[in-house]
Amino acid sequence: MRIRLRIAYDGTEYVGFQSQTNGVAVQDVLNAALSDLFQREVRTLGASRTDTGVHAEGNVAVFDVDTRIEPSKIAFALNARLPEDIRIVGSDRVPDDFHPRFQNTVKTYEYRILNRAHADPLTRRTEIHYYYHLDENAMNAACSYLLGEHDFRAFCSAGFSSKTTVRTIYQASVTRTGDRLVFSITGSGFLYNMVRIIAGTLIEIGSGKYPPGRMEEILKSCDRKMAGPTAVARGLVLMEIRYPDYE
Amino acid sequence: MRIRLRIAYDGTEYVGFQSQTNGVAVQDVLNAALSDLFQREVRTLGASRTDTGVHAEGNVAVFDVDTRIEPSKIAFALNARLPEDIRIVGSDRVPDDFHPRFQNTVKTYEYRILNRAHADPLTRRTEIHYYYHLDENAMNAACSYLLGEHDFRAFCSAGFSSKTTVRTIYQASVTRTGDRLVFSITGSGFLYNMVRIIAGTLIEIGSGKYPPGRMEEILKSCDRKMAGPTAVARGLVLMEIRYPDYE
């Protein structure tokens, strides 16, 4: 049977979710824990690669297994075999043809910014520190241009190979709570570095370098050089992946 | 002149704030950074020792120095010399007779609990994970017995040497946000391990082992054996120390 795992991880020590040749990936550690649990080589298929240093509250991976362990209990058995910076936060059975990538998905990311004079050591691993005041209203206004179906080529790093650069954004907003800003975005999928480039652009807009309408100009240009810098990885968290066809 | 520092730190790697013989304390690292900045040996006087593994958003320390650096800029100069898990979040000048401990203080602590099936790797350093459901209403009801002036001897670990075990609690409450519970407590001072023993007792009450009125019985008993276990250090954060006489 096919088991789906929801995976949370502190990405600080990993080269991303997907196995690479240049370092330890979350998937390497996960596959080893699964192989230990089921006493045979188990390989997972992941939903989202995530870049080096990016975090997750709910990435998704599947694997096939014959076992008498109840699907929901697999999370507990795995957590006993995983390091503290990786946790399985849920496990369930899915249909045998369930593929974590090649179907309708709705992904939500957060990008977290501490906006005050000095950084906070308690949250330093999962947010960036930005000294100058950011205007969350301007950032929110800029977010509105992202909603709907657009060609997001301007927000895509080189090296991306996909049939199309068109994606649909269902929700995008910036919320301030005291000194903390959270940029939240939900969409049908994201190009390489897309959320981080949008975050970098929003910081330029929030700091007053450009007006909110800049976001629309960049989108229409389809030119990566128009957009802001790629914001650093530590502020990004993959929050959730939903599969509307299986709910 | 006397300079006051507000200090935030991730206590995971330290034996507490105050210098000890059994490991590296936050104060050791802070004194070294100050000595490097001012090119002479500088020694700080801290407000709260904090236990091994306990965190702070706003501990306080003072030191004396002759310098032309503007007091508020000292925080920036120090942060350039400190590791990422320690940040000075504010610096100002105080009167020469300002002592961080021997005067009126109002301290606020938080104890953070993740109450769900699986732990969260992104917040694992600053919260504990508790699997069984906790009833925040029962915990809040128990908190009400703590308010006011009481002898808190029952919530004090052995080895505490103070003239009196009477303290005044101004505020104590438990707030749930989704799966997260935060126990917040503000008082005139706290005995050794007092917040962690109260947190351990609140967890017993929240899990249904005892009713809220147990808190009053424990208080009146003045007997440490009546109270719950000392909750683990990683969940505790010293949020703020205020000095009403200097505001």
Image (cartoon, coloured by chain):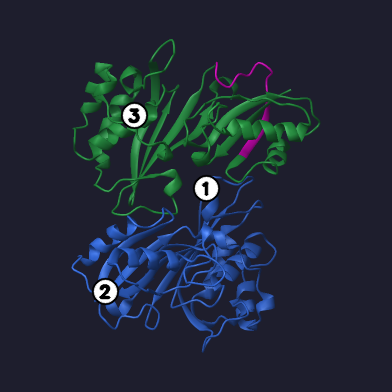
Chain colours: A green, B blue
Residue B65: assigned label: 2
**Closer to us: mark 3 or mark 2?**
2
Tags 1 and 3 touching, CB below 8 Å: no
**Closer to us: mark 1 or mark 2?**
2
* Depicted A70 relative to depicted B67: above or below: above
Q: Secondary structure at mark 3?
A: helix
Q: Which residue is mark 1?
A: B178
Tags 3 and 2 touching, CB below 8 Å: no
* Depicted B90 relative to depicted A30: above or below: below
Give coordinates of residue A153: x percent, y percent.
33, 17
Does residue A67 show up magenta in the picture?
no
* Depicted A22 relative to depicted B57: above or below: above
Which residue: 42% across, 64% down? B29
Residue furthest out toward the right:
A68
Q: Secondary structure at mark 1?
A: loop
Q: Residue A70, can we see it?
A: no
Looking at the image, residue B69 sits to the left or right of residue A163; the answer is: left
Say which chain tag 1 marks.
B
- Graded by Cα atoms within 10 Å as few (under 14), some (14 to 19) or many (20 or more), the crowding at tag 2 reads some
Q: Amino acid at mark 3?
A: Ile
Magenta part of the protein: which range?
A88-102
Give coordinates of residue A58: x percent, y percent.
54, 35
- Graded by Cα atoms within 10 Å as few (under 14), some (14 to 19) or many (20 or more), the crowding at tag 1 reads few
Tags 1 and 2 touching, CB below 8 Å: no
Q: Residue A209, can we see it?
A: yes
Q: Which residue is mark 3?
A: A197
Which residue: 79% across, 29% down? A67
Q: Amino acid at mark 2?
A: Val
